[in-house]
Each structure stands twice: as C-alpha cells, then as structure tokens.
Image (cartoon, grey):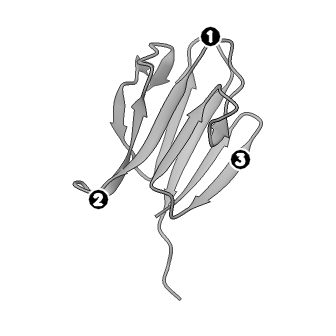
Amino acid sequence: MDIMITSKNNEKFYLDKNVITVGTSPACNFQLDLDFEVLLSIQYDFSIGNYVILNTFSNKKVLFCNKPLSRLELGSVNKICFFNSDEFLKIRVLQRIPA
C-alpha cells in the first residue's frame, strides 16, 4: 500500500513502506512543527492486513475525533489534530491499481 501524509505546511508520499515515523524530531520521516514533543509510528500490521498509527509517547495532546489517540487502525482518510494547535496530520492510505 501507499500512503500520502499531509500537514499544515508539508506533504509527502510513501511507496511500499512498512514503518513511517511522524513527529517533532528531525530524525522522523515526516516532521511536524509543534511546541511539544510528539512521536507517532505508522506501521503495517500483517495480522490485520492494514496500517495502524501508534502514539509512541502516549502524548494526550494528539487527538482523533477530539479524543486522545493511543492506537488507531487507519481507514482510507484519517485526520489527526493536536491540542491548542492549528497543525494537523491527514493520512490517506492509497491502493495502487496494477498496470
């Protein structure tokens, strides 16, 4: 599967990647501009055949549907928000059509 990640000021496309890190550290695959530390991990879970997102630091300022996020099985489009911030994270799981 392919994933498109969009934030307030950035957008990246990932092709056939099993683990993607998203956070405030420059070492992350996708970097966020926040006033607090965040580390999210998007991983492919082979047991369910889908991607999940994990809030690695268990930061309660990471929100999905206005509730703190700990783990989420990704649908086709997912929007993650951050408490008291206009930063957001939109994750789209794309299915490639064979040629």
Instruction: Indicate which disc residue 3 carries.
Output: none
Q: Give the x, y percent position of residue 19.
A: 47, 49
Please say if the residues under marks 1 and 2 sit with CB atoms less than 8 Å apart.
no
According to the image, label 3 marks what residue? Answer: 11
Instruction: Indicate which disc residue 49 carries.
Output: 2
Most foreground residue, 66 or 21: 21
Q: Closer to the N terminus: mark 1 or mark 2?
A: 2
Residue 72 occupies which quadrant of the picture? top left
- Mark 1 neighbour density, 10 Å: few (under 14) some (14–19) many (20 or more): few
- Indicate whether 20 appears above or below 1: above
- Residue farthest along the left direction in this orientation: 47
Q: What element carries label 1?
A: loop
The amino acid marked with disc number 2 is Gly
- Residue farthest along the right direction in this orientation: 9
The amino acid marked with disc number 3 is Glu
Instruction: Indicate which disc residue 84 carries.
Output: 1
